[in-house]
Amino acid sequence: MRVGIGHDTHRLESGRPLWIGGVQVPSDRGAVGHSDADVLLHAVTDALLGSGGLGDIGQWFPDTDPQYAGADSSRFVEIARDELAGLGLAVVNLDVIVFAESPRLSGFASAIRERLATLLETDIDRINFKAKTGEGVGPVGRGEAIEATAAVLVDGHGADREASETT
């Protein structure tokens, strides 16, 4: 078993789309970034890469490379997932937190969990999503930024481990 942790922060700006976990969330402000600026998928990508000892998102998808300008961050997750599969590793569990003052994200939790489960090719019950505010403190609390943290557990047996242990 291996663990990976990812974290990302993006500034917010008026008139931009807000993507969280591969889901477009209605908002008057969106994240600023080289790709689609999906803060959650960036944190998940970093966690996946970290669990395999594969470096970080900046090494794989540098913001200086024009091919990633406006890129769908779902592709980053898929590439990291496939790299882990090449090492014989699969996701056992993913736990994520998004920190944003607004919009309130609890109504999007199911859609985000479903999208993450699809991207990771795992069951939705292995994905946990939490949303927190900044309580008015710091850049997140002032509505200037959005942050996400992801923790992933991977194993060589992936989701099949429990089934083999019970037989």
Image (cartoon, rainbow, N blue to C red):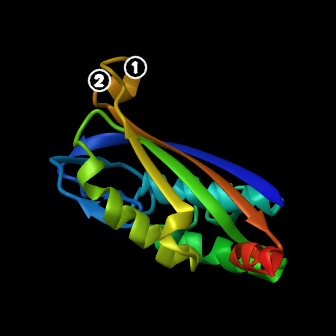
Amino acid under label 1?
Gly
Disc 2 crowd rating (10 Å Cα; few below 14, some 14-19, many 20+) is some
Q: Is label 1 in a helix, a strand or a loop?
A: helix
134 shown above or below 156: above
Residue 131 appearing in the image: yes
Quadrant in the rendering for residue 138: top left
Q: Nearer the viewer, residue 111 or 87?
A: 111
Give the alpha-carbon distance from disc 1 to disc 2, as whole Å: 6 Å
Q: In the image, what residue occupies the spot 23% across and 53% down?
A: 107
Residue at x 66%, y 74% (from the top left corner): 81
| Residue 25, horizontal then vertical, whole percent | 24, 57
Q: Residues within 10 Å of mark 1 (few under 14, many from 20)?
A: few
Q: Would residue 54 appear left or right of 110 to someone viewing this image? A: right
Badge 1 vs badge 2, beta-carbon distance below 8 Å: yes
Image quarter hosting the C terminus:
bottom right
Q: Which residue is mark 1?
A: 138
Secondary structure of residue under mark 2: loop
Q: In x, y percent, where is residue 22?
A: 39, 67
Q: Which numbered disc covers residue 142?
A: 2
Q: Residue at x 40, y 71 (%)?
A: 114
Q: Nearer the viewer, residue 66 or 97?
A: 97
For badge 2, the amino acid type reads: Arg
- Above or below 137: residue 16: below
Residue 166 in the image: state x and y as whole percent.
Answer: 78, 75
Residue drawn at x 52%, y 49% is: 96
Image location of residue 44, percent across then percent down: 57, 58
Asked whether, in this view, residue 89 is left or right of residue 74, the answer is: right
Q: Nearer the viewer, residue 37 or 67?
A: 37
| Quadrant location, the N terminus | bottom right
